[in-house]
Amino acid sequence: MNCIVVDDSSIQRTIITKLVNESTFLNLVGNFANALEAKNCINNNSIHLLFLDIEMPLINGFDLLDGLKTKPQIIFITSKADYAAKAFDYEATDFLQKPISKERFIKAVKKATELHSLRYENHEENGDSIVIKSNLKKLKIFVSKIKWVEAFGDYIKVITDEENHLVLSTMKAFETELPEGKFVRVHKSYIVNLERIENYLFWRSTLGCIPKPPKNWRCSTKCSLKIKIFRC
């Protein structure tokens, strides 16, 4: 797995880099003291795993992730446990608190490699896939089989051809896991597979797009989901 280390502390970068180089599963592409250099590397290389500090000058770790179109796996590295809850919103593979022990590092890398294998095995034969965690199990789901995704309290519900999966995640975080250009978020509570939409209904007025939909609107889809998409 190609990885990079991002931490403004030269001491911490040295420690993590040493642990990475000792791992037979990881290939260190680079280590960076700031988010701008890291972003440039991610955009120009195939990076699978990011060891990321959170508190950094100018651009922090969360801001770096917000600016990425495609996110690699993330293992956060920080001295503050208070960030753990927010790290969940970014679908972190693991959260390591400084100082980091070798045993804890190995455990985090094992999780990352297992997830990497699930995502990429048979990828060329079977098409795009994502890995979700439902009922305490990690499942590989091919995106072509996803009909739609809907918000369900603190969870999301992934509707597929075979069954429905309840996943502890936010809509925003899950949306970043989906391949770009194949899904559209038609509502704050719904994400739809574009290949499953049969037709769209549009309402326009002489003043432009109507800001709110009429009471009785719907759009027929293969997934039997009633939606409405507004486009100017």
Image: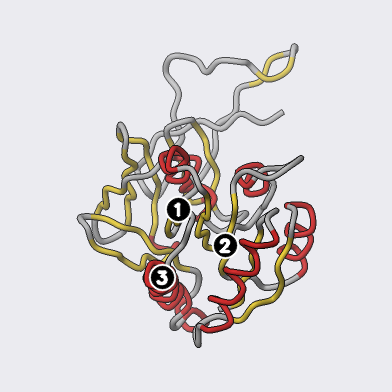
> Looking at the rendering, in which quadrant would you find the N terminus?
bottom right
Tell me the residue at 45%/23% (across/down): 217
Residue 129 in percent (x, y) is at 45, 67
Residue 51 is tagged as 2
Residue of label 3: 115
Q: Is residue 220 visible?
A: no
Q: Nearer the viewer, residue 204 or 170?
A: 170
Secondary structure under the numbered disc 3 in the rendered image: helix
**Camera-side mark, 2 or 1:** 1
Secondary structure under the numbered disc 2 in the rendered image: strand
Q: Which amino acid lies under the numbered mark 2 shown in the image of this protein? A: Phe
Measured Cα–Cα span from mark 2 to mark 3 = 15 Å
Q: Nearer the viewer, residue 62 or 226?
A: 62
Residue of label 1: 97
Q: Which amino acid lies under the numbered mark 1 shown in the image of this protein? A: Gln
Residue 187 in percent (x, y) is at 49, 31
Sequence order check, earlier mark of 2 and 1:
2
Tell me the residue at 67%/48% (across/down): 64
Tell me the residue at 75%/53% (across/down): 34
Res. 14 image quadrant: bottom right
In the image, is residue 106 above or below residue 60?
below
Q: Which amino acid lies under the numbered mark 3 shown in the image of this protein? A: Leu
Residue 41 in percent (x, y) is at 76, 65
Give neighbour class at mark 3: few <14, some 14-19, many 20+ (Cα, 10 Å): some
Q: Mark 3 and mark 2 in contact (Cβ < 8 Å)?
A: no
Q: How many marks?
A: 3
Secondary structure under the numbered disc 1 in the rendered image: strand
In the image, is residue 66 above or below residue 114?
above
> Looking at the rendering, in which quadrant would you find the C terminus?
top right
Sequence order check, earlier mark of 3 and 1:
1
Q: Mark 1 and mark 3 in contact (Cβ < 8 Å)?
A: no
